Amino acid sequence: MLEQPNEDTESGGMIQCRFVDTEGHSKVFECPVNRWVRIKEGEGGFFRVPVVTMKFCVARRWIEAEVNPGDRQQFNYSVLIGRNRLKKGNLGG
């Protein structure tokens, strides 16, 4: 569920995300939207997606990163964490 962004600031609103683990357990998280970004579509158009801050446990360390909690069911990974963020958390190679 998405709330529309504040048109003046391009921020605000809340988003609810449902995460399901490998055993089928699900949990709903509600996060404030930091900002909205425009993503280019294949035919020259754009669509807007929310960006939120989330905490992740990676290699037994907690890191905080901005993510786009979009539907990634058709992809191999449920979330992508950039190498710059991993380096900041001393997790890069």
Image (tube, rainbow, N blue to C red):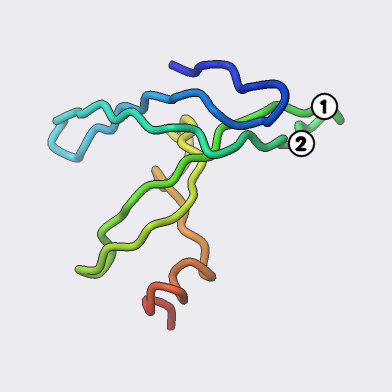
Q: Quadrant of the C terminus?
A: bottom left
Instruction: Please name the amino acid that badge 2 sits on.
Output: Lys
In the picture shown, does residue 36 fall above or below 86?
above
Q: Could you tell me residue 9's position as x and y percent?
A: 68, 31
Residue at 29 percent across and 30 percent down: it is: 29
Q: Secondary structure at mark 1?
A: loop
Q: How many marks?
A: 2
11 with respect to 42 (left or right): left
Instruction: Please name the amino acid that badge 1 sits on.
Output: Gly
Q: Could you tell me residue 15's position as x and y percent?
A: 43, 25
Asked where in the image residue 63 lies, by quadrant, the reply is: bottom left
Crowd around label 1: few <14 · some 14–19 · many ≥20 (10 Å): few
* Residue designated by label 2: 40
Q: Are marks 1 and 2 in contact (CB under 8 Å)?
A: yes
* Residue designated by label 1: 45
> Residue lying furthest front in this view?
8
In the image shown, does 56 or 5 lie closer to the viewer?
5
